C-alpha cells in the first residue's frame, strides 16, 4: 500500500463549500478533499488549480492544499442541500498518499454513509482498500479505478499505486461489491504509450471479471504538455509523433473504432467520453 510522499509541500486552506456541482451526468456533486495531488501524473490538467495560486505547471505533485474545514462544511451542507450522488473526486485523488496522514476522505465517507447519500469514487490508489469496511455499508456505491498504461507508469504517474496494485484493488472490489458496481476509467488514452498497453490491459480486466470500461482521450490543458514532454523524452518516444496523433481528430476516431472492437470482443460494456 502506498505511503505518504514526504517531498510534497503541504499547505492548508478553507473553502466556502465542499459539495460543488459535478460536470458528469452520473453525479450531482463533486467532493474534492484536497487541492492538488501528490500522485503528480504528468498528463493531469487539474493543475490549473495550482496555476491560479501562482505555481508553475511543473509544481503539480509537489504542493497539496488540505481543505481544513472540509468535514465541518460537509456536515453543514448535507443538512440543507438536495440529496444526490457525490463524486469523489473530480480534481484530485481522494486516496492520494497524504490521505494516510490526514484521513479526510474516510471522515467524509462516514458522514455521507450516516446520511444515506449515494457515492461514486475514482482513484488510482490501493489505499482505497482501507475503507472497504465502509464501502460494503453503502446502499448505492460505485467504485472506479483509473488506468492509462500497464508499463512506464512510474514515469507518467510517479507517486500513484503500481498497475499491479490497481489490479489488486479491482479484484477485491469486484468480489466485495459485485461486478456491476466496479468499473475502470481508461484515461487518459495516451498516443503511442496507451496503444502499446491496450490489449494487455483489456485481457487483465477481463480475467478479473470487470464488465464496464469508460475511456477518454488525452486533454491538452493547463500546460500539461510541459511535463508530458519530459516523460516522453525519458522513455524515448518522439515528441513529434506523439503530438501529431494527439492533435489529429482522425487519430481519435481511429482510437474509438479500434477500442470498441477490442472491448466488445471481450464483452465489456463501453462508455466513451470523446
Image (cartoon, helix red, strand yellow):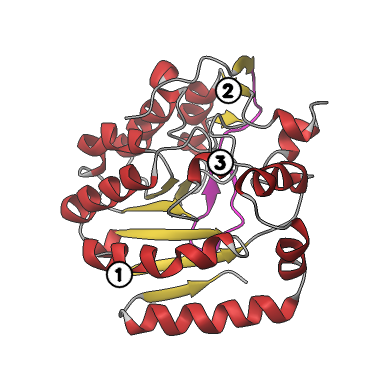
Residue 158 position in % (x across, y down): 53, 35
Task: Tell which circle, 3 or 2, labels the residue nearer the N-terminal end.
Answer: 2
Marks 2 and 1 sit apart, C-alpha to C-alpha, by 35 Å
Marks 3 and 2 sit apart, C-alpha to C-alpha, by 28 Å
Residue 156 position in % (x across, y down): 57, 44
Task: Tell which circle, 2 or 1, labels the residue nearer the N-terminal end.
Answer: 2
Q: Nearer the viewer, residue 6 or 229?
A: 229
Residue indicated by mark 1: 211
Against 147, residue 74 (above or below) is above
Marks 1 and 3: which is nearer the front?
Answer: 3
> Label 3 crowding class (10 Å Cα cut-off): few <14, some 14-19, many 20+?
some
Residue indicated by mark 2: 67
Q: Taking the image as drawn, is residue 66 in sight?
A: yes
Residue 132 position in % (x across, y down): 23, 38
Mark identifier at residue 155:
3
23 is within the stretch colored magenta: yes
> Which contiguous range is marked in magenta?
13-30
Left-right relation of 254 to 160: right
50 is within the stretch colored magenta: no
Please report contact status of discs 2 and 1: CB closer than 8 Å, yes or no.
no
Q: In the rendered image, which quarter is residue 192 located in?
A: bottom right
Q: In the rendered image, which quarter is residue 208 located in?
A: bottom left
Q: Quarter of the image containing the N terminus?
A: top left
Count of labels in the image: 3
Task: Tell which circle, 1 or 3, labels the residue nearer the N-terminal end.
Answer: 3
Q: Taking the image as drawn, is residue 83 in sight?
A: no
Against 133, residue 253 (above or below) is below
| Residue depicted at x 39% and y 77% | 263
Mark identifier at residue 183:
none
Amino acid at each position: 500500500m502506498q505511503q505518504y510522499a514526504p517531498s510534497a509541500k503541504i499547505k492548508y486552506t478553507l473553502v466556502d463549500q465542499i459539495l460543488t456541482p459535478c460536470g458528469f451526468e452520473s453525479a450531482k456533486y463533486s467532493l474534492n478533499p484536497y487541492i492538488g495531488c501528490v500522485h503528480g501524473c504528468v498528463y493531469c490538467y487539474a493543475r490549473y488549480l495550482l496555476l491560479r495560486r501562482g505555481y508553475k505547471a511543473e509544481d503539480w505533485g509537489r504542493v497539496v492544499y488540505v481543505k481544513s474545514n472540509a468535514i465541518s462544511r460537509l456536515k453543514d451542507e448535507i443538512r440543507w442541500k438536495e440529496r444526490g450522488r457525490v463524486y469523489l473526486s473530480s480534481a484530485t485523488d481522494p486516496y492520494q498518499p497524504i490521505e494516510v496522514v490526514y484521513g479526510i476522505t474516510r471522515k467524509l465517507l462516514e458522514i455521507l454513509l450516516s446520511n444515506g447519500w449515494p457515492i461514486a469514487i475514482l482513484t488510482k490508489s490501493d489505499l482505497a482498500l482501507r475503507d472497504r469496511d465502509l464501502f460494503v455499508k453503502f446502499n448505492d456505491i460505485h467504485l472506479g479505478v483509473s488506468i492509462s498504461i500497464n508499463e512506464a507508469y512510474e514515469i507518467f504517474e510517479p507517486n500513484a499505486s503500481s498497475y499491479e496494485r490497481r489490479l489488486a484493488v479491482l479484484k477485491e472490489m469486484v468480489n466485495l461489491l459485485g461486478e456491476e458496481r466496479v468499473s475502470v476509467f481508461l484515461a487518459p488514452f495516451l498516443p503511442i504509450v496507451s496503444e502499446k498497453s491496450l490489449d494487455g490491459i483489456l485481457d487483465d480486466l477481463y480475467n478479473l471479471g470487470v464488465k464496464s470500461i469508460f475511456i477518454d482521450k488525452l486533454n491538452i490543458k493547463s500546460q500539461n504538455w510541459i511535463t508530458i514532454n519530459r516523460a516522453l523524452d525519458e522513455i524515448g518516444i518522439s515528441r513529434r509523433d506523439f503530438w501529431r496523433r494527439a492533435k489529429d481528430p482522425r487519430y481519435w476516431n481511429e482510437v474509438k473504432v479500434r477500442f470498441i472492437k477490442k472491448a466488445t470482443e471481450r464483452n465489456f460494456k463501453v462508455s466513451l467520453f470523446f
